[in-house]
């Protein structure tokens, strides 16, 4: 086996179905090896989207997604996507090419200090120096990506360890001096020694099985302490974040646990949709107001960061239970009364197992919160539209009526996307994909690609702002070539609205904020997809229905929605 085949066999052993890449000579043997084993190789138009797609696969399957990129700029193009995965705590494996081992630091094509650039974005780096190191490095990478606080792992693979040994020896021989001088003979001897060291141990090399991942269970003592505190509460509140869904296979058990606990709940990040669209325990609005009234708060899988005003939203005398895999996140900004470093999904499942059956919930408190939630929904529905163009709220209220049970919503943008969070209701667990705490623009095409490949029968939508759409619309070429029918909804107000409103009010200038109301729908046909425009409210239902029909027949679709500028989220900028 050459190094590319060793990597491919290891990926196959780990149940990897898809590898995302942008082709490069440094890593071709890995991709060919994957193709031979039936691992589907999906080539994209920008390396960042390969990592975003791998990130989505990780989140939806629980198996680390895999991206393969070439050396130098191929690797540096992944940095934002890698950092996003790290901050979102997504387990993935990035395999990167590198110049030949003997040429490092000598000015070879695309030879840079890759490890120095990437080290702050990953949990662990493996820089391979001989072929016998590959199997263990690969197996360790998959374990480390998932263990503890999940995150990306990088494996640097020099080109002369990936190609067949006889080819590599020919390369070296062709560039080695042929003279009989002492210097020439010494160089030939060194190269032969170097090659022997590189390839020694290859014969009979064992790929090895996937390594076990140690879990992070909560102690029985902490569970009993939490039960006592919950029983003593009159107004408990549960907040569930993305980290509680690291084990997709446990989603049904997690839902059952939340229902048994009967605690009113807010869902954030990947947890959106956990309880379906309209579960009686689930709340959507006025979270800060609810937190200010609660006398017990459980944060399961999210920290006290800017989203909770750095802990200030939890009132001083409320009993605070924090559950998080990360010790840092557990105590960030506000130390819990009960700090539990454990997997939050597992904690909730175990908590429910030991929770007294006689507990009947908190019906008065829940009804108070439900009325508050319903009033906000009514306020949203009854607000005045934004001018003559389509109001974003009106659009999403209509779109929500057209979502199927098996819909996945990928959100990529600022103001338009944030508006969708108030009005769209994910229908089932693991059906909402957002970038996470980094707030990265550009995740849309990659996330949607990974999601649709994993769940081909789902209706996968990208909710784009017209600004964020510019990062990845070219991936419609990828969607067409690989037959991945995705629907993109572009909210086109010719503006970076989330910045525009406050910048103009505070600084008196719209510099850098204005865009053109471009014909984005024309990009679809140019790349072999379909394009639609919605310019009137009366067109929304028809175009959404037509787009879904086209996608179900195998055609990717771009929908350009002409929206008016809205003050719905005025003052909401986070800086």
Image (tube, rainbow, N blue to C red):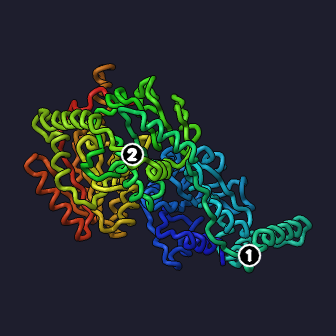
Q: CA distance from mark 1 to mark 2?
A: 45 Å
* Residue occupying the point 49% across, 40% down: 226
Instruction: Indicate whether 34 appears above or below 63.
Output: below
- Where residue 461 appears, as percent x and y from the top left, is 28, 56
Give the residue displayed 10% in from the left and 46% down from the top: 537
Q: How many marks?
A: 2
Label annotation for residue 383: none
Q: Which residue is mark 2?
A: 269
Specify the quadrant that holds the N terminus.
bottom right
Q: Residue at x 40, y 27 (%)?
A: 313
Left or right: residue 401 versus residue 271 is: left
For the residues bearing labels 1 and 2, Cβ distance under 8 angstroms:
no
Residue pointed to by mark 1? 202
User: Which residue shows up at 10% across the image and 37% down it?
Assistant: 388
- Badge 1 marks a residue whose secondary structure is loop
Residue positioned most to the right: 182
């Amino acid at each position: 086996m050459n190094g590319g085949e060793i990597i491919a066999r290891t990926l196959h052993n780990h149940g990897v179905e898809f590898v995302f890449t942008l082709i490069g000579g440094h890593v071709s043997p890995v991709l060919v090896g994957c193709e031979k084993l039936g691992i589907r190789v999906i080539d994209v138009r920008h390396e960042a989207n390969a990592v975003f797609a791998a990130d989505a696969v990780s989140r939806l399957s629980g198996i680390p997604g895999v991206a393969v990129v070439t050396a130098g700029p191929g690797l540096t193009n992944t940095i934002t996507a890698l950092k996003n995965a790290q901050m979102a705590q997504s387990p993935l494996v990035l395999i990167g090419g590198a110049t030949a081992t003997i040429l490092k630091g000598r000015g070879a094509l695309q030879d840079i200090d890759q490890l120095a650039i990437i080290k702050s974005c990953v949990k662990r780096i493996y820089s391979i120096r001989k072929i016998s190191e590959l199997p263990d490095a690969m197996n360790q990478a998959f374990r480390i990506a998932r263990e503890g606080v999940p995150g990306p792992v990088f494996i640097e693979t020099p080109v002369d360890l990936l190609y067949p040994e006889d080819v590599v020896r020919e390369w070296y021989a062709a560039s080695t001096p042929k003279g009989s001088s002492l210097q020439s003979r010494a160089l030939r001897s060194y190269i032969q020694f170097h090659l022997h060291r590189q390839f020694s141990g290859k014969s009979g090399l064992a790929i090895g099985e996937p390594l076990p991942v140690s879990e992070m269970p909560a102690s029985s003592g902490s569970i009993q302490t939490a039960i006592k505190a919950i029983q003593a509460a009159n107004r408990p509140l549960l907040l569930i974040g993305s980290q509680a869904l690291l084990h997709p296979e446990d989603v049904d058990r997690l839902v059952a646990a939340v229902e048994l606990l009967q605690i009113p709940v807010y869902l954030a990040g990947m947890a959106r949709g956990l309880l379906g669209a309209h579960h009686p325990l689930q709340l959507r609005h006025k979270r800060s107001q609810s937190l200010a009234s609660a006398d017990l708060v459980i944060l399961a899988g999210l920290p006290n960061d800017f989203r909770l005003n750095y802990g200030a939203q939890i009132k001083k005398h409320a009993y605070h239970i924090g559950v998080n895999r990360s010790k840092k996140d557990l105590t960030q900004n506000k130390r819990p009364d009960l700090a539990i470093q454990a997997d939050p999904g597992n904690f909730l499942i175990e908590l429910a197992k030991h929770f007294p059956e006689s507990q009947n919930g908190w019906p008065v408190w829940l009804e108070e919160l439900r009325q508050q939630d319903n009033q906000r929904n009514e306020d949203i529905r009854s607000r005045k539209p934004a001018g003559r163009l389509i109001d974003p709220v009106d659009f999403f209220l209509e779109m929500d009526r057209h979502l199927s049970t098996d819909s996945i919503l990928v959100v990529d943008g600022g103001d338009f996307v944030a508006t969708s969070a108030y009005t769209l209701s994910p229908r089932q667990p693991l059906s909402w994909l957002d970038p996470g705490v980094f707030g990265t623009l550009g995740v849309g095409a990659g996330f949607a690609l990974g999601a649709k490949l994993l769940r081909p029968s789902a209706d996968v939508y990208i909710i784009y702002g017209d600004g964020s759409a510019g990062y990845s619309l070219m991936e419609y070429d990828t969607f067409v070539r690989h037959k991945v029918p995705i629907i993109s909804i572009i909210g086109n107000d010719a503006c970076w609205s989330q910045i525009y409103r406050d910048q103009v009010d505070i600084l008196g200038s719209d510099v850098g904020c204005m865009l053109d109301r471009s014909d984005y729908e024309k990009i679809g046909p140019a790349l072999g997809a379909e394009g639609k425009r919605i310019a009137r409210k009366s067109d929304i239902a028809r175009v959404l229905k037509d787009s879904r029909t086209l996608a179900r027949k195998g055609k990717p679709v771009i929908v350009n929605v002409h929206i008016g500028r809205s003050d719905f989220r005025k003052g909401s900028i986070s800086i």
